[in-house]
Amino acid sequence: MKFQNLDLIMRQYEEALDQHIPPKIWPVVRLDGRSFSTLTQNLELEKPFDIKFRDAMIATTKHVMQAGFQAIYAYVESDEISILFSQNDNTFRRKIRKWLSTLAGEASAAFTHHLGYPGVFDARICPFPDTEIIFDYFRWRQADSARNSLNAYCYWTLRKNGKTERQATSVLEKMPVEQKYILLRSYDINYKEIPKWQRYGIAVVWKNIMREGYNPITKKTVTTKRRSLEAITKLPRQQAYQDFIQQFICE
């Protein structure tokens, strides 16, 4: 069989399950760390939160946001990264398999390079039709961050004070939220004084930076505007958080 004929047949199989992000849809890609509980254990990272791990997640997010797509806004909590892309981003002609494989690969490579230990991410796409559902999505992830943070502090406080894994899990099972605050206070931990990034996550956003330079041709000082990524570790909550996100989204 001639190569051209074989190539035509094989490409039909290769592209048989291809899907595309529909036009004018806002893609949010969520990257989740695979077996990161084992990773943090092997690296003996601080529990429940570790600065080195946080910085690796921020560095990974910045790398992915500059990986050739039109990234607008990112949110980081624990071992997951959610990135909003432009509704007009036509990278890879919006082929979902290309988006997922590329973004997961970029994240895995960047995280591994930064931390010096293999870290693998999976990826999924959430296709949103308008900005209102985008706001709901990021408020949902922030609420998840707060819930997980409180549970993690309670669990590891118990573990550090002699409870086994099973005992700590049993104590916290079906425990009301207010009781968890009381539990932490009994160990002299005021949850409201815990750093905000541990409770409400981190945003990575584009900022315009004005820089002065020298033009050797005109022999004049010139001011240029450049975009740079910045991590915001003190985020507002609820409606104020929605207002915060709004400033980075341009329809």
Image: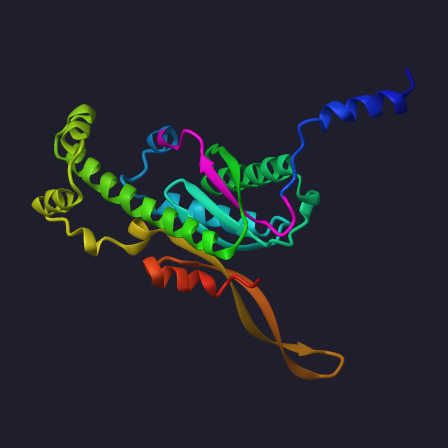
Q: Residue furthest left?
A: 186
Residue 102 placement: quadrant: top right
Residue 123 horizontal/vertical position (percent): 52, 36
Q: Is residue 31 magenta?
A: yes
Q: Could you tell whether 42 is left or right of 18 in the image? A: left
Q: Residue furthest top?
A: 1
Residue 126 horizontal/vertical position (percent): 51, 42
Segment colored magenta:
22-37
Q: Could you tell whether 17 is left or right of 155 in the image? A: right
Residue 21 horizontal/vertical position (percent): 62, 43
The residue sitting at 48% across, 42% down in the picture is 30
Q: Is residue 251 magenta?
A: no
Q: In this view of the protein, which residue sits in the foreground, 10 or 33?
A: 10
Q: Is residue 155 visible?
A: yes
Residue 10 placement: quadrant: top right
Q: Could you tell whether 241 is left or right of 16 in the image? A: left
Q: In this view of the protein, which residue sits in the foreground, 109 or 170?
A: 170
Asked if residue 153 is positioned above or below residue 38 in the image, the reply reads below
The quadrant the N terminus occupies is top right
Residue 62 horizontal/vertical position (percent): 52, 52
Q: Could you tell whether 141 is left or right of 96 in the image? A: left
Q: Is residue 234 visible?
A: no
Q: Residue furthest right?
A: 2
The quadrant the C terminus occupies is bottom right
The residue sitting at 83% across, 24% down in the picture is 7
The residue sitting at 22% across, 42% down in the picture is 153
The residue sitting at 45% across, 37% down in the picture is 32
Asked if residue 93 is positioned above or below residue 235 in the image, the reply reads above
